[in-house]
Amino acid sequence: MDRETTRVLMERLRKDADRICERFGLRLGVLEPESPRVRSRYGICYSDGTIRIRLRHAMTGEPLRYSSLVNTLCHELAHLRHMNHGPRFKALYLKILDWARSEGIYRPRAAEAPIVRFETPATLQTAAVAMAAKRRRRAPARAPATQVVAGEAPARGTPARAIVQLELFGS
């Protein structure tokens, strides 16, 4: 995407953002494209009202559809009032998105439901590994499992909830 295309796209986003801000009483500062080197997010809202929007897909580098940009924009605009992802933020974000849809600003395509698509099995596997690691970080710590050999008493100091190997078939 060349500079002129980026400029025109950002002007269009700014006009749409200004309409949304006027309707919802929001104060937007600077609206600018996110650096292509940043791959961890599609948009960010700073407390000074600055919003940055990613214009290209993080994995493929392809330009994002305008409706995806508007979806991200609406999300970040909701952060101008609620700097978290709580229930009030979600309610405002959905109101903004619904209004933008009714005004023809946000026109999603049915096939566009997920904004991020993983194009290859390798990236899908990488995403799955990352998600599993995230779940592990959130999971409460568990006591290490211990194994008791069938027919033996548990060792002294073994937790009461030790896993016991059952003898299913006689020897």
Image: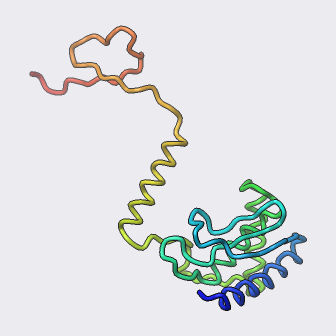
- The N terminus - image quarter: bottom right
Res 161 → quadrant: top left
**Color theme of the render:** rainbow
The foreground one among 82 and 169 is 82
The reply, left or right, for residue 140 in relation to residue 67 is left
Image height of 79 relative to 68, above or below:
above
Image coordinates for residue 164, horizontal then vertical, percent: 30, 22
Res 169 → quadrant: top left
The reply, left or right, for residue 1 in relation to residue 21 is left
Say which residue appears at 78% left-offset and 85% top-offset: 103
- The C terminus - image quarter: top left
The foreground one among 77 and 92 is 77
Say which residue appears at 64% left-offset and 84% top-offset: 66
Q: Residue furthest left?
A: 171
Image coordinates for residue 89, horizontal then vertical, percent: 76, 60
Image coordinates for residue 107, horizontal then vertical, percent: 66, 84
The foreground one among 95 and 37 is 37
Image height of 167 relative to 68, above or below:
above
Image height of 88 relative to 158, above or below:
below
Image coordinates for residue 62, horizontal then vertical, percent: 52, 81
Q: Residue furthest top?
A: 156
Image height of 8 relative to 35, above or below:
below
Res 153 → quadrant: top left
Say which residue appears at 58% left-offset and 83% top-offset: 109
The reply, left or right, for residue 86 in relation to residue 39 is right
Count numbered badges in the picture: 0
